[in-house]
Amino acid sequence: MMKLGFGKSCLTPKLGVELTGFGWFLNRKAESVETNLFARATAWDVDGFRFVLVICDLLGFTEEMSDKIVSGIAENNNISKENVLLAATHTHSGPGMGCLVGCGEPDFETLANLPGKIIAAADEAFANLATVTSISINEDEFPFTFAYNRIKNDDTSIDPTIRTMRVEREGAKPVAIVNHSCHPVCLRATPAISADFPYYFCDHLENAGFDAMYINGFCGNIDPYYTGHYGAAQHAGKLLFDRTMELFDADKKMDETDVAVVGGLESIALRHITLDQMEADVKQAVANKDWSQTRALSICYDRASLRLMYEDDPYTEQMEFRALRLGKVLFVFHGGEICSAFGDMIRDAFPDYTVFLAGTAYATKRYVATEKNADEAEQLWSMRSSVPATHTVASRSNAAPAKSTSKRSLTASNRLYNNPKRTVERQFFFYAPMSYFIAKERDILKNLLMRAADRLSVPVNAVTNIFHLELLGDRELYLENHKGIAEYSENEIVLRGENRLIRICGANLNLCAMNDAELRISGTVDSITFTSL
């Protein structure tokens, strides 16, 4: 039997607290509440296996706060800490959380109260478990997406899909869980508290009779097109809602309900940088007379210097993750502000699953990019590639709504900057703590998928790029997940696999068929040897 409960609690801070995101030491204090902030929780009981998903309208969490929330939920509801999946929507208009240097000074009363409120949402969800009568899932393109790649400045290198789960319950509202990837920064740097477009999306679903949860995916390099006025977040939320309802109309029931979870800390390799490089960044900020940047980089320089001087392995960091499989759905929560390429890699590795991804989970630390996309990571940390706050593309059919006349234009928020001459277009979106230690290795993904495959009962050849080789007698060889051909003759063929060469020796060897992933060789196979690269 499966049961599901839903809980929700308000996280809106008091007026006057500093808000986070968009730049360093902006002194951006909350003057009004555009939308409330919430913690939403879905608690599950699958034949006695209990777990919970918790999503909060916050920028992220410090390690201390994450540990307190996870431990409190686990203790109150008699579950393992591994079974608590915690993430933030990453709104940039919530209270300063203390996890980013200079991006909103934390209000200690607010931070002290947040864990209890978030734990209360999970407790409410477990207290209101109702029998599940059906689960339906869907995944499809988002043709009118409001998102673009803020580094490549296009709408191709993004997460182009929406994933939906609709859960019908006996005697309770249906629950909608929806996953997409985009920075919730439609409002830009206003002095208003706001959950941005996720609030309006969930509000539409609630008005349609659902309990709603939005899970923000790997959005490290993805921003909304339409920004700079109060209608932009409403517009984005409505677009997302409309497409979600279309997917609900065509979703398919999921019969499998087995569940497993894997999680813990994962070691990732970080970008190498010297003290001289950091000092040069500080001097450049001084030369530019950008005193906010100078102050932030100086703090980071001090922290990074201590790390480089006193830590045995300063270029490796532990980041927390969870991977949970529920039938044909896979939830992956990760602590980084992850670029979208990782999402593509995970979904390619699990083609038979609907994969819900959540970034900025647990202790939120830094940007994470693949080695292949290290150029994006470089731009994210260097802050040399910003886009106008009012960026639009004229050819798009989902035109941005007109600017609101009932409320102050967002461009008035320029006054929040220490330098009154700085324009909205000069807003900095990228954060100092991430500047000097950016992960750009794919090892974290490979390790995560391998561990997930082992614990979640997913076939090993369905994950990462590990090759799969089959030999039919001595006459035919089949290889999956190859990386190309290194040498070729009728007596010897050398193939490239992940981190090794595969040498096939024999007679009358012939490449019968080959595509990007698979190949087949016929002939007489005498020997197969493997050499590490």
Image: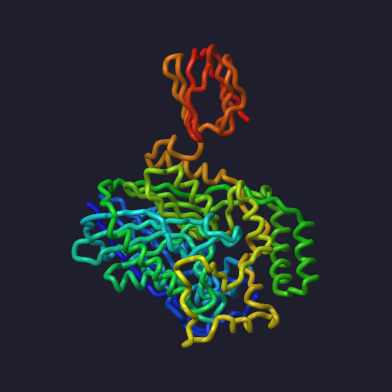
**Position of residue 256 in the picture relative to residue 268 (left or right):** left
Q: Position of residue 211 (x, y in %)?
A: 31, 67
- Say if 473 sits above or below 261 in the image: above
Q: What is the quadrant of the C terminus in the image?
A: top right
**Position of residue 286 in the picture relative to residue 26 (left or right):** right
Q: Position of residue 218 (x, y in %)?
A: 50, 57
Q: How many marks?
A: 0
Task: Tell me which corner region of the image, top left, top right, bottom left or bottom right, holds residue 170.
Answer: bottom left
Q: Residue at x 75, y 54 (%)?
A: 274
Q: Look at the image and tell me whether residue 466 can be seen.
A: no
Task: Tell me which corner region of the image, top left, top right, bottom left or bottom right, holds residue 123.
Answer: bottom left
Q: Look at the image and tell me whether residue 260 can be seen.
A: yes
Front residue of 119/443: it is 443
Q: Residue at x 66, y 50 (%)?
A: 315
Front residue of 9/142: it is 142
Looking at this rendering, what residue extends furthest in the left direction? Answer: 171
**Position of residue 131 in the picture relative to residue 21 (left or right):** left
Q: Position of residue 522 (x, y in %)?
A: 48, 18
Question: What colour scheme was applied to this rendering of the protein?
Answer: rainbow
Front residue of 314/488: it is 488
Q: Position of residue 307 (x, y in %)?
A: 69, 56
Front residue of 403/461: it is 403
- Say if 317 sits above or below 119 in the image: above
Q: Residue at x 70, y 74 (%)?
A: 292
Q: Residue at x 50, y 84 (%)?
A: 15
